[in-house]
Image (spheres, rainbow, N blue to C red):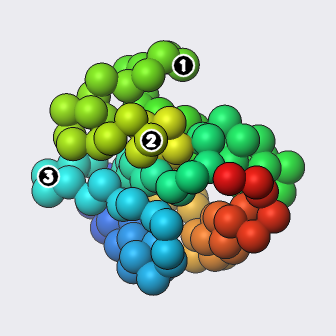
Amino acid sequence: LNIEERLERVSQLRSSLIAQLREMDGVIVRDIEGASPYVLNISLLGYRSEIVLHYLEQRGVYVSSGSACSKGASSGVLELFGAKPAEVDSALRISFCAENTEEDIAALVQGLRDAQKELMH
């Protein structure tokens, strides 16, 4: 794939994920205009990002917590975009590449739904 094809593929996957996440309760999607299509930040309200991150990891789904520049600390970047402290505490960063598939997106969405059912608030 050339760079334009990769960008188109990633943009489609990101849009698909956003549409599915918007159907879920308790999920905040930070779809900021002009943002990189290769990254999406969300919050799963009521669930600490580290707990969800490890829950997903056990299912073979890998995401990050916070923002790329926070390095484990609370992210001032997310607060600049209007995130409340509880939203920052539950933030997950999802990265995309052209090798990702719709099945990857489905596994992530199902993992988040299962986390909401199985994990303690």
Instruction: Please tell me which of labels 3 and 1 falls first in the chain.
Output: 3
Measuring 50% from the left and 36% from the top, which residue is drawn there? Answer: 89
Which residue is at the far bottom? 23
Residue 76 image position (x, y, % from top left): 30, 23
* Residue 86 numbered mark, or none: 2
Q: Nearer the viewer, mark 1 or mark 2?
A: 2
Which residue is at the far right? 58
User: Label 1 crowding class (10 Å Cα cut-off): few <14, some 14-19, many 20+?
Assistant: few
Measuring 36% from the left and 60% from the top, which residue is drawn there? Answer: 29
**Does the rendering let one see residue 82?**
yes
Using residue 59 as the reference point, say whether residue 80 is left or right of it: left
Q: Kindly identify which residue carries mark 1.
A: 72
Using residue 75 as the reference point, say whether residue 48 is left or right of it: right
Q: Amino acid at mark 2?
A: Ala
Q: CA distance from mark 3 to mark 1?
A: 25 Å
Q: Amino acid at mark 3?
A: Gly
**Does the rendering let one see residue 17?**
no
User: Label 2 crowding class (10 Å Cα cut-off): few <14, some 14-19, many 20+?
Assistant: some
Looking at the rendered structure, the secondary structure element under dot 1 is loop
Q: Kindly identify which residue carries mark 3.
A: 34
- Quadrant hosting residue 7: bottom left
Which residue is at the far left? 34
Relative vertical location of residue 65 with respect to residue 6 in this rendering, above or below = above
Identify which residue, 71 or 28, lies in the foreground: 28
Q: Where, quadrant-wise, is the N terminus in this rendering?
A: bottom left
Measuring 85% from the left and 49% from the top, which residue is drawn there? Answer: 58
Instruction: Please tell me which of labels 1 and 2 falls first in the chain.
Output: 1
Pointer 3 with pointer 2, Cβ within 8 A: no
